[in-house]
Image (cartoon, rainbow, N blue to C red):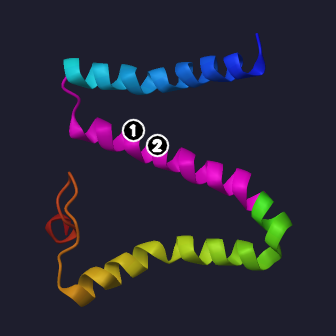
Amino acid sequence: MSGALAAGFWGLVAGSALVLGATITYVVAVPPRVVATVMAFGSGVLISALSFDLMQEAFEGGGFDATRSWLSRGGGGLPGDQRLHLATGHPLPQTIWGSAAERQ
């Protein structure tokens, strides 16, 4: 099997997970908590892939400045989002468990 055919086959296998997941959720009622858990796991996988794969390449290509910039932007996302919501007067987004004020 040539490289292009192998890549196409494995791309089809990986993409079939999306179709399989969509079919399952169309047939079965999935609780919001399960959806949130799967999404959180997927987010963690994506963040770890970025950290382990791309950070080494960024460090080798741009040195510590590129690494520091990436880490500071990632760490400032949540506080920046909260400050933006407070500054604009818009409420923070609701979660499936309710707002932070409702949980306290």
Residue at image location 55% in from the left, 45% down from the top:
45
Q: Is residue 34 left or right of residue 5?
A: left
As helix, strand or loop, the secondary structure at mark 2 comes to: helix
Contact, mark 1 vs mark 2 (Cβ under 8 Å): yes
Q: Where does the image place residue 64, in percent across and percent down from the top left?
A: 79, 76
Q: Specify the amino acid type for callout 2.
A: Phe
Query: Which residue is at the far bottom?
Result: 87
What residue did someone put label 2 on? 41
Q: Quadrant of the N terminus?
A: top right
User: Is-magenta flag for residue 52?
Assistant: yes
Label 1 vs label 2: CA separation? 5 Å
Q: Where does the image place residue 84, in percent across and percent down from the top left?
A: 31, 83
Task: Classify 30 as above or below 80.
Answer: above
Q: Quadrant of residue 6?
A: top right
Task: Classify 68 as above or below 29.
Answer: below
As helix, strand or loop, the secondary structure at mark 1 comes to: helix
Q: Quadrant of residue 31?
A: top left
What residue did someone put label 1 on? 38
Q: Is residue 7 left or right of residue 43?
A: right
Query: Which residue is at the far top?
Result: 1
Near-viewer residue (32 or 21): 21
Q: Specify the amino acid type for callout 1.
A: Val
Q: Which residues are magenta?
A: 28-56
Q: Where does the image place residue 34, in percent across and percent down from the top left?
A: 30, 36
Task: Classify 88 as above or below 31.
Answer: below
